[in-house]
Image (cartoon, grey):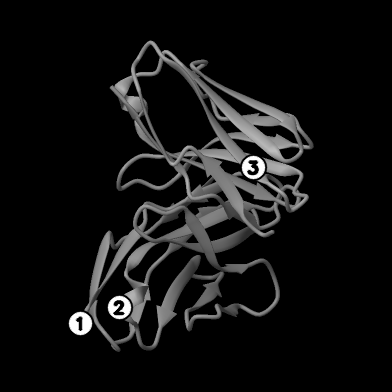
Amino acid sequence: DTEVTQTPKHLVMGMTNKKSLKCEQHMGHRAMYWYKQKAKKPPELMFVYSYEKLSINESVPSRFSPECPNSSLLNLHLHALQPEDSALYLCASSQDLLYRQFFGPGTRLTVL
Amino acid sequence: AQSVTQLDSQVPVFEEAPVELRCNYSSSVSVYLFWYVQYPNQGLQLLLKYLSGSTLVESINGFEAEFNKSQTSFHLRKPSVHISDTAEYFCAVSDRGYQKVTFGTGTKLQVIP
């Protein structure tokens, strides 16, 4: 199994909703990442987890809350989002930090 | 700090013609360099990477890139493109001492039949 899966593929939510994005990998990777990609823009790093501990938080607003319950799973909890948070959210994993990152297909989020 | 510049936002090219997508980077330390491809409505796929050793790196689908330290460039080339190569291509750089990958703004390759 050499892929990163993300659910859901699409998500539409209101500004008062609470939702979660999920990412899963079974490659034994110990580093996992969340990126945000706006339309026609490059991906921007949000969070990095290494060995299930938050390693990097790129000054992301607190309405985004990451969680790494185990070495295979990475969640992104969403609460009180704004319409400008609408984007493609990409998850990635790597064997360890600085190794090749494998990207999931992304969750396309629309905030109304 | 590091940065990546992709000067061409769009590159139209006829099928079977050669193509070069330009990438320049800046960094105060040694870096790793990457090219990623993103097909419409999909995530990123690593195309090729330069970590060390030979400055010319190749991918399995005919793309190649050459690391030029003096010109701080990592241009992507293919001698003959196919319709299926139509996609967005991102150049990226990673500081060897840090795990952050910085992406360029992307170049949209449009292959014309």
Amino acid residing under circle 3: Glu
Q: CA distance from mark 3 to mark 2?
A: 32 Å
Query: Which residue carries the number 1 mark?
Result: B113
Q: CA distance from mark 1 to mark 3?
A: 38 Å
Chain letter of the residue carrying label 3: A
Give the percent coordinates (x, y) of residue B24. Answer: 44, 62
* Residue sitting at x 65%, y 48%: A93
| B106 or A49: nearer the viewer | A49
B46 vs B76, left or right, is right
Q: Nearer the viewer, mark 3 or mark 2?
A: 3
| Observer able to see residue B1 | no
* Residue sitting at x 37%, y 27%: A85
Q: Quadrant of residue B86?
A: bottom left
The secondary element bearing badge 1 is classed as: loop
B5 vs A21, left or right, is left
Q: Residues within 10 Å of mark 3 (few under 14, many from 20)?
A: many
Above or below for A12 versus B106:
above
Query: Which residue carries the number 2 mark?
Result: B83
The secondary element bearing badge 3 is classed as: strand
Above or below for A42 versus B58:
above
Chain letter of the residue carrying label 2: B
Query: Which residue carries the number 3 mark?
Result: A24
Mark 2 on the same chain as mark 1 = yes
Above or below for B87 versus B97:
below
* Residue sitting at x 26%, y 84%: B15
| B23 or A84: nearer the viewer | A84
Q: Are marks 2 and 1 in contact (CB under 8 Å)?
A: yes
